[in-house]
Amino acid sequence: QVQLVESGGGLVQAGGSLRLSCAASGRAASFGSMGWFRQAPGKEREFVAGRRWLGSYSTKYADSVKGRFTLSKDTAKNTVYLQMNSLKPEDTAVYYCTASPKLYSPIRADEYDYWGQGTQVTVSS
């Protein structure tokens, strides 16, 4: 059974930084790709960043976070990270770690099989 556990959310002022972590347990070797989504109140869950789990491949980012967010991974620890810099109030959302058997880092939420419980990120103006 796969379990994804996020940590690192919190309250930060605009312009600040946070780093989210996602630790995977279970059949992590079966992951094709891992990534992050977010969901703000009243909005649909949206893709933030994703990459192939094994090997060195480029990371896919949403246009809204390019140049500010960086996804990285530590395969030995079965952990992915999301470094978020220059945060804006519109980044406020619940952030979810997710894993898919697909290799191409899908941007649709329904192509991901595993989800963490989510961690709240609040950016004050």
Image (cartoon, rainbow, N blue to C red):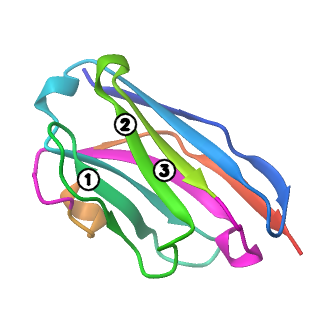
Q: Residue 86 falls in which quadrant of the image?
A: bottom right
Is 42 contained in the magenta span?
no
Q: Distance between the residues labelled 3 and 1?
A: 15 Å
Residue annotated with mark 1? 51
| Magenta-drawn segment | 85-105
Residue annotated with mark 2? 73
Relative placement, left or right, of 43 versus 50 is right
Relative placement, left or right, of 47 versus 76 is right
Q: Nearer the viewer, residue 27 or 87?
A: 87
Relative to 37, does residue 61 appear above or below in the rendering? below
Q: Residue at x 45, y 69 (%)?
A: 45
The x, y position of residue 96, in whole percent, is 48, 50
Q: Distance between the residues labelled 1 and 2?
A: 9 Å
Q: Which residue is drawn at 27% across and 69% down?
A: 107
Relative to 2, does residue 116 appear above or below in the rendering? below
- Earlier residue among tags 3 and 1: 1
Q: What element carries label 1?
A: strand
* Rendered image: mark on residue 95: none
Q: Residue 99 falls in which quadrant of the image?
A: top left
The x, y position of residue 123, in whole percent, is 79, 65
